[in-house]
């Protein structure tokens, strides 16, 4: 069964067209002992990350490997239940999928889910930065062009990477991620550029009698105003949501692309170690958040949503519902959904 499932991947990746892309909803064909990438790492040939995962799936699994197999299966079933038809993707839909050719990795980054640190790690792994990811400044990690995107390649090259590279993403409980994006981009002083770009529009559109200072700077957007902006039909008519509050499934298309590892922010250290082990870099240390940061973020989200009416909580849940369903998140206990 597992071998049959992996073989379907090669067929799906063959469906690329020049204008529209129907990508990777099925696994790839590998056999014991294959090296899907055939890349020379640190002077020697090693099994690719995808092949390593395949081999793990064929024998007795560790608890961690079994947990990731179950996540893949849950995602596959959820896609089958909640998506009526497979979506045709365009090249720009692949913009968030970053490529590490040296290691044979595809990483779809979701902002506010440790993506800065994952970019640092990929730069370190690919030799584009210092060997210690913590030494790479955040602006360098996010600099355009530092890491190639899958959208930069021809359809044939996209197909080859989809067939042979390990694809992974990291997700987070949607409302906690939303609270983190609000705090980081619209509340904190270093979010001035976002405040001018989005905050001023939110104030102008939704606040009765705004002050001239708020109209000019957009520095004091309230959480309720931010949520009202997300739910305003005009926001989505203007184009996709900004990546920091766009739904994870809309950034990474997990029902059209096959992800081999679905990591979670809630189990970041364990899941990051699993990916790095598959990549042949178990000694590389993933940058850890400060002690207590996870609990503080959860408490902050609860405080912010406490003042939001059940009506608006329900509407917002509708907007992010697919992320809850696809990635197996429960509704937070602090919500008062009708």
Image: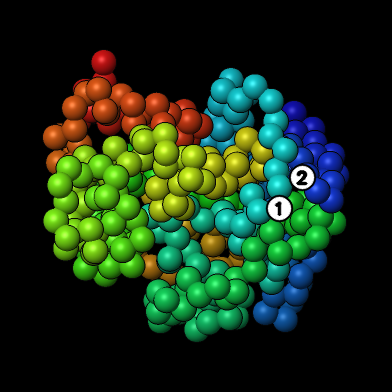
- Tell me if residue 92 comes above or below residue 190 in the rendering: above
- Give the camera-side residue of 279 and 134: 134
Q: CA distance from mark 2 to mark 1?
A: 7 Å
| Circle 2 SS class | loop
- Give the camera-side residue of 191 and 128: 191
| Circle 1 SS class | helix
Q: Which residue is mark 2?
A: 21
Q: Quadrant of residue 117?
A: bottom left
Q: Quadrant of residue 321?
A: top left
Q: Residue at x 71, y 64 (%)?
A: 152
Q: Quadrant of residue 144?
A: bottom right
Q: Residue at x 44, y 52 (%)?
A: 242
- Give the camera-side residue of 144 and 3: 144
Q: Which residue is mark 1?
A: 91
Question: In x, y percent, where is residue 195?
Answer: 29, 61
- Tell me if residue 68 comes above or below residue 309 in the rendering: below
Please report whichever mark, 2 or 1, sits nearer to the chain's N-terminal start: 2
Q: Residue at x 80, y 66 (%)?
A: 38
Q: Can residue 199 be seen by looking at this rendering?
A: yes
């Amino acid at each position: 069964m597992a071998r049959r499932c992996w073989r379907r991947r090669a067929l799906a990746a063959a469906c690329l067209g020049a204008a529209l892309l129907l990508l990777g909803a099925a696994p790839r064909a590998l056999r014991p002992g294959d090296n899907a990438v055939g890349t020379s790492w640190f002077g020697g040939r090693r099994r690719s990350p995808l092949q390593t995962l395949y081999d793990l799936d064929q024998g007795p699994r560790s608890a961690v490997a079994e947990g990731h197999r179950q996540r893949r299966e849950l995602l596959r079933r959820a896609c089958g239940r909640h998506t009526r038809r497979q979506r045709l993707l365009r090249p720009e839909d692949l913009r968030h999928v970053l490529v590490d050719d040296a290691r044979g990795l595809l990483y779809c980054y979701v902002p506010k889910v440790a993506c800065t640190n994952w970019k640092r790690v990929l730069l370190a792994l690919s030799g584009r930065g210092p060997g210690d990811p913590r030494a790479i400044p955040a602006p360098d990690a996010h600099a355009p062009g530092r890491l190639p995107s899958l959208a930069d390649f021809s359809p044939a090259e996209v197909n080859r990477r989809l067939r042979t590279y390990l694809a992974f993403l990291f997700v987070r409980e949607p409302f906690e991620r939303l609270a983190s994006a609000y705090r980081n981009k619209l509340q904190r002083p270093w979010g001035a550029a976002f405040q001018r770009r989005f905050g001023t529009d939110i104030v102008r559109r939704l606040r009765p009698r705004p002050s001239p200072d708020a109209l000019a700077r957009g520095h004091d957007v309230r959480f309720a105003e931010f949520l009202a902006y997300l739910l305003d039909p005009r926001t989505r008519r203007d184009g996709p949501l900004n990546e920091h509050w766009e739904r994870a499934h809309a950034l990474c298309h997990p029902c059209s692309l096959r992800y081999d590892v679905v990591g979670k922010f809630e189990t970041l250290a364990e899941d990051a170690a699993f990916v790095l082990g598959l990549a042949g870099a178990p000694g590389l240390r993933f940058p850890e958040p400060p002690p207590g940061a996870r609990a503080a973020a959860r408490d902050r989200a609860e405080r912010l949503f406490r003042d939001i009416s059940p009506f608006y909580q329900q509407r917002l849940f509708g907007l992010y519902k697919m992320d809850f369903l696809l990635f197996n998140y429960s509704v937070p206990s602090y919500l008062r959904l009708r």
